[in-house]
Image: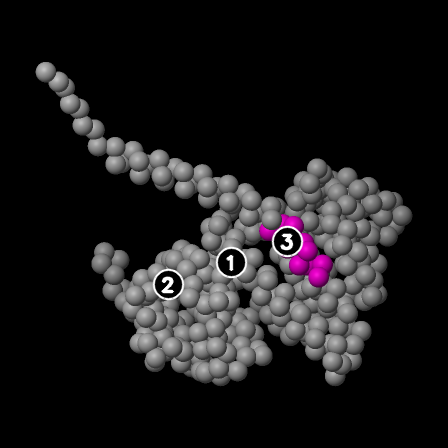
Amino acid sequence: GSVIIFRDITRQIKDEETAFRTHKLESLSLLAGGIAHDFNNLLTSVMGSITMAAEECGEQSTVRSELRLAEHALESARHLATQLLTVARGDELALERVDLGAVIHEFTKFHLLGSGVRLEIALPKDLRAVVCDRSRMGQVVANLTVNAIQAMSGEGLLRVTAENLEETREGEGIRHCVVVRFEDTGPGIPAEIADRIFDPYFTTKEEGSGLGLATVHGIIEELGGRVTVSGTPGRGSCFTLVLPASEGPVPEPAASDRPRDAEPAIEPLRILVMDDDPLIRKLLVAYFTRRGLEVGFATHGDEALRQYQEAIDQGIPYDLVLMDLTIPGGMGAVETLEKLRGLDPEVKAIVTSGYVGDEAMTEYARFGFAAAISKPFDLGSLQHVVQEVALSGATTPSDPGQ
């Protein structure tokens, strides 16, 4: 006789495949974080150098216009790096109440510069605010705008509309939403690829990366909304976003969004810059010195502590400290700030980083920082943050339980 035993291992195989994919994503996340740090440092140096070079040229200079084009290309590089990290790492969103209309105006107009695409925006005055990560929502708008430009080969019409909506969800009652539509006059989307259009790395464009729409889908889903696409070949396409709306009023523009020429110059001001990247140290020292500020620099936490103490002993203390979050082989911003408070409980500190999603960046006040600015940053934005912090009172760490 014989004994035959059958065992269904389908679930086991699926579990093994899931575990393997999870391990690959974790490895990719670590790799992406390390690459992002170095890449964003490089972008910061290049962007800052271009800004300073442009300042040396007259407004009508051909060289200045070429430098502006280079800045625009670097913005695209920064945008692509952020997209890749969003797909690879799935970083947590820093949620706040956001004026969606302001985000739409800002990011569509910026990315249409230099293209032949016309823009029409129709938004109601009573458009509700949404709870989202403003930077990531900017990514969504930018990706959909760039997608439309590429679909229309740089010529055509992009129309962006929005409206408030109340929808009934089973078991949840009525939910207030905001609906945004991006309609272009491109060739439309063939039915055979409509189901794959949000897949990572899927693209039909020669210049496309296949990450833009995947990023849009991931961000909107994480916010509790949904994104759909419709269209007819030869008659354009329409991307529709449905986002849960905030119950509160549309927020006032943040100080950093207001015109910078309204900000007073802060002089005299002494800044201590701590960064392990020599290019960034050199850039920031040159930039702030050109504006009449006194700047010291340190490569790691121990050196920053020593210089801060020496400045106090000499009776010329630093007004604020600008510190990199992570210093390989040395104390980073968080640990350094804790020790600086032992020297000066009123110390004002700004944290910078090329890493995405670190708690010290998204919840900087909890760690005692007065502000956080992500790399790569443009020097104008950095100066604005420095001015605001210099005018503000000292920041103390908040209770992590609050």
- Do residues under tags 3 and 1 come within 8 Å of each other at their CB atoms? no
Q: Position of residue 147 (x, y in %)?
A: 46, 70
Q: Position of residue 246 (x, y in %)?
A: 40, 64
Residue to which mark 2 is pinned: 197
* Residue at 30 percent of width and 66 percent of height: 192
Please identify the quarter of the rendering in which residue 69 is found. bottom right
Q: Residue 83 has which mark?
A: 1
Pointer 2 or 3: first along the chain: 3
Residue type highlighted by circle 2: Ile
Q: Name above or below for residue 205 compared with residue 275.
A: below
Under circle 2, the secondary element is loop
Residue to which mark 3 is pinned: 39
Q: Which residues are magenta?
A: 36-46
Q: Position of residue 393 (x, y in %)?
A: 69, 57
Mark whose residue sits in front, 1 or 2? 2
Residue type highlighted by circle 3: Phe
Left or right of 185: which side holds 360? right
